[in-house]
Image (cartoon, rainbow, N blue to C red):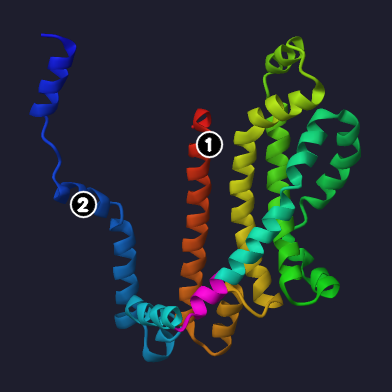
Amino acid sequence: MNLTTARTQELLVKPIPSVMTRLVKQLRRFAFTAAILVLWQYVSTSVLDQTTRALLPAPTAIFPAAWELITSGDLLHHTLDSLKREMLAFLWATIAIPIGIAMSWWRAIEEQLDPVMELLRPIPPLAWIPLSILWFGIGDTQNQFIIFLAIFFPILLNTISGVKSIEQNLIRAARCLGANQWNILRRVVFKAALPYIITGIRIGLGVGWMALVAAELVGASSGLGFLINDARTVLRTDYVIVGMATIGIVGLLIDRTIRWVSKLFLPWSR
């Protein structure tokens, strides 16, 4: 009996999991989430009194509120505005990639820029909100500035780490084959550091998403942060929770998208 025949018989004997079995395995992943929702429902409806219940509405009250925001188009409108600010600020923040490569490759540039970057990096993006409102006013530019700061430094630090971790034998081999400095930077250094850069983008977009929503709480006329703050002023805690849930879902989708792109274009870094 050859190897192929044995493998075929093994597959025939091995039971194929049914659709129901696979469904049960998938649902089992959400057991803890379901338990939290059940506990939340019980506390809101049976433990809290009528007055306090308004501050923590039950899940059965959240879903109708979410449907209201979806059917009215408000949720989509505010979500798209927040995503637009995030993406535009991200495009500006990608300047951190060439800066990080330059700082890692040329010591003179690192000596000049490193003290400034290390001075600015510990300052939280939210600390810039008062100044950014004075500089840019309340609107998209101010929000984009805050999220730019949040995204810039994670990309910068991961780019520097990626370049400095490159195996020196790769660079020596490229030089021995006649590659000039530009080709080494473009075809060896950048590609070798790309997994680190993608990690920096993942971290940066996550931090930037949180910073953007916080900036919208005080400096925007639209967006998910504005939606949450506006609902708070009229005591619509159900809208507040819907806005918070949307922030979490969108943030999860952004992260999953980056991970999918990374696996697609950087299979060697899995």
Tell me the element at label 1.
helix
- Asked if residue 76 is among those painted magenta in the image, a careful observer would answer yes
Q: Position of residue 162 (x, y in %)?
A: 67, 32
First reached walking from the N terminus: tag 1 or tag 2: 2
Residue sitting at x 63%, y 46%: 201
Q: Where is residue 117 in the image (x, y as percent from the top left)?
A: 82, 46
Can residue 144 be spotted in the picture?
A: yes
* Quadrant location, the N terminus: top left
Contact (Cβ within 8 Å) of mark 1 with mark 2: no
Can residue 165 be spotted in the picture?
A: no
Q: Judge left or right: residue 181 versus residue 78.
A: right
Q: Position of residue 121 (x, y in %)?
A: 77, 50
In the image, 212 versus 101, the foreground residue is 101
Residue sitting at x 83%, y 69%: 131
Q: Where is residue 85 in the image (x, y as percent from the top left)?
A: 66, 65
Assign the magenta stretch its main secondary structure. helix
Label disc, if present, on residue 265 of the rendered structure: 1
Residue assigned mark 2: 23
Q: Judge left or right: residue 268 versus residue 5.
A: right
Real-space Cα separation, disc 1 to disc 2, in angstroms: 31 Å
Number of marks in the rendered image: 2
Tell me the kind of residue under disc 1.
Phe
Tell me the kind of residue under disc 2.
Leu
Residue range corresponding to the magenta coloring:
72-79
Query: Could you say which quadrant of the image residue 171 lies in?
Result: top right
